Image (tube, grey):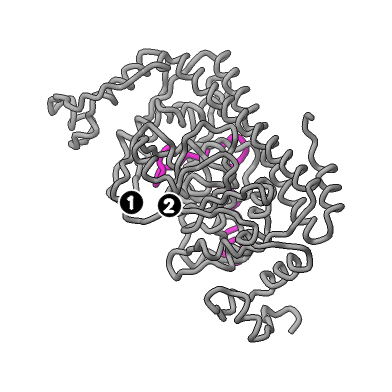
Amino acid sequence: MEGLEISEIMLSYARNNNEVFRFDSTYFQKEYLLDEAKIRSKQFKTLKSLGADIKSFGAYSLNNDVRYLERGIPFIRGVNMKKGRISFTDMIFIDEQTNTLLWKSEVKPEMILLSMSGTIGDVALASKQWRYPINSNQDIAKIETKGKINPYFLYTFLMSKFGQNYLNREARGSVQQHVFLSQIELFEVPTVSTDLETSIQRIVEWSDTLLINAENLYSQAETLLLESTGLKNFSPTMRNVNIKSFNTSFNVTKRLDAEYYQPKYEQVMSKIVAQAHAPLNKLVDIQKSIEPGSDAYSDDEDGLSFLRVADYDKFGITKPQKRLSTFFVNENRDDLDALKPKKNTILFSKDGSVGEAYCLREDGDFITSGAVLHLTVRDPNKILPEYLTLALNSKLVKMQAERDAGGSIILHWRVSEIENVVVPLVEKTIQTKIAAMVQKSFSLKEESEHLLEVAKRAVEISIEQDERAGMQYIEANSQWNQ
């Protein structure tokens, strides 16, 4: 049976090694069984036997009492968990009263956050450097180790292939996948030395510091942009009544919906056009991508990555979940090669999360969906790609997207409207300073991600081989200031 995805197991094993007596083939994949055997070949304990405290949101009926705000106490959702981190850029908030009501889901420093629903396997570690209080929704489990196991090691182990495979193996559900608290309690975690735990903790903590420094530097670049355009302290009016004649409204814009004419949009536009500015179509060339038919996709790992709006944000690209089949790529190679975005191309979304911009720092070996436009700066002497990307992600353009985009289910921003987005043009010296800050921010972020990968791989090596090999890998691949 060599080379076939076939596993032979004893009935007694099937009875004793899964909570609900699953006997589907997915649960007994070779990779899962091999991972389990490697962990059980060493000393290990379950989270339950370690006395870990695992909590979730509580009763779903509590949702009826939750009031979401634009400011207040951050309320983490699954959408905020990416690549082992929490993104606070698309956060919703709750008030103190709701935070007290949802005491079971309050997040504390060094808690491990684990996605129980939707995208199974997303994990994060609550940083000691965050500002608390913070809370989270019903789809996120909170794990407190109570000093019985180093939380930094457990966090890294959960991100490793062993942790991810365990969670994927235990996931249940035909439409939306779930992992339950009772399954998380039975998670088998290898027992390792204090030296390895300490080394992993130092790497993760330094990675966390680098990421926070990167985010602060990016925030400073955003502040400099707003200061340079006179919009740092701009607070749009809350007034929602505006009187327009037919000639100054529909005759010009072809829009009759009241939302489009809210005074706050006129305020921000008057601020921008009062200084040097240009429409986007005068600054960039806009290229559309493709939306292939359903038969073009494949699970083949050798297929070409197909990047969608959900696969990136202003801070970077995550591994695309879809791929184009090798057959489709070979049949359309010339056309597809022409559609691969080049270095300094700005990816800009027109559907879904409209107005999300990211500037590539190297040529892309992927194709984007039709919902992602490719913007190429015509004259870098007039406007720098990094500066333009920051401007597109700023509230100056976000408010234009909010005004223009339509759609009852999925937001859509027409290309003809995107072409007329008004971009402020600050002095070149300020653009250069902003670009340098953005570049440094991304450099720190890449270093942070590298260290996290080192920690994860070191844990895997320690399980696959031994702790000595894991420690040697750390020494060879992680250099940071002591």
- Vertical placement of residue 202 versus 10, above or below: above
Give the residue drawn at x 76%, y 67%.
38
Residue 76 is situated, as x and y percent measured from the top left of the image, at 46, 43
User: Magenta region: which residues?
Assistant: 326-355
| SS at badge 1 | helix
User: Could you say where residue 356 lies in the image, as x and y percent from the top left?
Assistant: 46, 38
Residue 45 in view in this figure = yes
Give the labeled residue for mark 1: 62
| Residue 331, horizontal then vertical, whole percent | 58, 63
Of residues 191 and 448, which is closer to you in this image? 191
Residue at 64 percent across and 42 percent down: it is 363
Q: Badge 2 is on which residue?
A: 57
Residue 464 sits in which quadrant?
A: bottom right
* Three-letter code, disc 1: Leu
Q: Is residue 335 visible?
A: no
Label 2 SS: loop
> What whole-number distance in Å separates the C-alpha atoms at marks 1 and 2?
9 Å
Q: Residue furthest bottom?
A: 11
Camera-side residue of 288 and 151: 151
Name the one closer to the observer, 252 or 325: 325
Graded by Cα atoms within 10 Å as few (under 14), some (14 to 19) or many (20 or more), the crowding at tag 2 reads: many
In the drawing, does residue 156 fall left or right of residue 193? left
* Crowd tier of the residue under label 1, counting other residues whose Cα lies within 10 Å: few below 14, some 14–19, many 20 or above: few
